């Protein structure tokens, strides 16, 4: 069995999954993957939707994506164990060691901070790669094209500034 | 907490957006595609930020090109409907900039992050804990963030600008995206730790 599918098979499959999710046979809604985070924050910190209007706003979308997330974790886990055989516990990505530094605490602190702002940014914009870039641009939504352009520029500028242009020797 | 987790399932099953099983299945397929194409790896998104890897943009542009055409005809046939998000300039520009910076540093987006946690990445789990706090801060200070996001300028789509020529517009739009996905040069940044596991 092949261990990895090429980008074009992944792109075709993702398009089919998007269409199924949009269709009346699937979810009859866009695919999204960032609303579940504040939804889970509400559950974990026991915040009442009566007191926090945002939780009321995301009550259904958060639940839908929460169930989907459980599926994604299951699908990802099974695939990593049986197909890609990439399941292993690790803290330091090879690419971080190569283009940033070898410090575990540096990676973990940056992970926490970037995870925090990743969700804050997605919630400010009203979506993420899935909700805006995939689902939104497929609907030719102007909002999602603005988001996509800003993210593209911001990602590339950050990559240029944050990482080294030459690989570290190891 | 248990009752609220159970409420998650009843909320989904009470609405007509797919049964719990269908939504779970959508998640499984999503996880399999991301894992099987390896776009959950740090080297893919952070690699793209460094312009050393182009698998993610190639895959995304192909997916939205094909899906935009398919979705248009499905909507025409009555099998789906459009749900575009509102144009909130402050939110889109400030949120998008923050999102892009964070994505380049974490090397994951909210969709690929959980999938890489599922393959054992502890650093991403720490990122997810950060994300839970991000979600908490957004929820608690929603009134403040709403001011940054700004007023909605409507849920406009490109198709509304070309009224009467929707089919032609969507074909040009979709085909352009597909062509972009093909002409982006293929570059790949591999993870040695993964390659060592590959015997073939």
Image: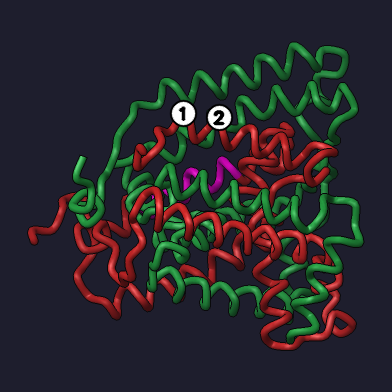
Figure check: B184 above or below A68: above
Q: Disc 2, disc 1: CB below 8 Å?
A: yes
Q: In this view, does A37 lie to the left or right of B87?
A: left
Name the disc covering residue A8, or none: 1
Q: Which of the 4 quarters of the picture holds residue A22?
A: top right
Mark 1 belongs to which subunit?
A: A
Residue at 21 percent across and 67 percent down: it is: A101
Q: In which quarter of the image is the N terminus of chain A?
A: top left
Drawing shade for chain A: red
Is A150 covered by the magenta stretch?
yes
Q: Position of residue A45 (x, y in %)?
A: 69, 87
Q: Nearer the viewer, residue B199 or B68?
A: B199
Give the residue number, with chain letter if any, for mark 2: A12
Residue at 33 percent across and 29 percent down: it is: B186
Q: Where is residue A35 in the image (x, y as percent from the top left)?
A: 70, 63
Mark 2 belongs to which subunit?
A: A
Tell me which secondary structure the magenta stretch mostly adopts.
helix
Drawing shade for chain B: green
Q: In which quarter of the image is the C terminus of chain A?
A: bottom left
Q: Where is residue B170 in the image (x, y as percent from the top left)?
A: 72, 19
Question: What residue span does the magenta drawing correspond to?
Answer: A148-159
Residue at 55 percent across and 46 percent down: it is: A150
């Amino acid at each position: 069995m092949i261990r990895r599918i090429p980008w074009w098979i992944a792109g075709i499959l993702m398009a089919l999954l998007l269409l199924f999710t949009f269709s009346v046979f699937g979810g009859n809604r866009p695919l999204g993957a960032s609303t579940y985070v504040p939804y889970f924050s509400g559950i974990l910190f026991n915040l009442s939707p009566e007191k926090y209007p945002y939780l009321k706003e995301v009550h259904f979308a958060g639940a839908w994506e929460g169930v989907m997330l459980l599926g994604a974790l299951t699908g990802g886990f099974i695939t990593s164990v049986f197909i890609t055989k990439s399941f292993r516990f690790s803290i330091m990505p090879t690419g971080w060691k190569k283009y940033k530094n070898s410090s575990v605490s540096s990676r973990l602190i940056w992970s926490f901070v970037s995870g925090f702002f990743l969700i804050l940014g997605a919630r400010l914009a009203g979506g993420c790669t899935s909700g805006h870039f995939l689902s939104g641009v497929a609907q030719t939504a102007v909002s999602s094209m603005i988001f996509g352009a800003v993210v593209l520029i911001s990602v590339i500028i950050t990559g240029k500034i944050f990482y080294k242009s030459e690989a570290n020797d190891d | 907490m248990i009752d609220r987790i159970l409420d998650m399932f009843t909320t989904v099953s009470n609405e007509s957006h797919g049964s719990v099983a269908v939504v779970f299945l959508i998640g499984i397929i999503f996880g399999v595609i991301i894992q099987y194409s390896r776009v959950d790896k740090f080297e893919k998104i952070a690699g793209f930020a460094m312009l050393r890897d182009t698998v993610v943009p190639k895959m995304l542009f192909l997916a939205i090109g094909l899906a935009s055409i398919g979705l248009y005809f499905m909507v025409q046939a009555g099998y789906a409907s459009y749900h575009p998000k509102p144009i909130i300039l402050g939110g889109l520009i400030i949120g998008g900039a923050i999102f892009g910076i964070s994505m380049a540093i974490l090397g994951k987006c909210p969709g690929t992050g959980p999938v890489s946690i599922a393959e054992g990445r502890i650093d991403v789990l720490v990122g997810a804990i950060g994300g839970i706090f991000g979600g908490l801060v957004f929820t608690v200070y929603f009134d403040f963030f709403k001011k940054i996001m700004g007023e909605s300028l409507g849920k406009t789509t490109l198709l509304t600008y070309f009224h009467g020529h929707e089919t032609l517009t969507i074909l040009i739009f979709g085909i352009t995206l597909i062509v972009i996905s093909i002409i982006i040069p293929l570059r790949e940044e591999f993870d040695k730790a993964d390659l060592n596991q590959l015997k073939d």
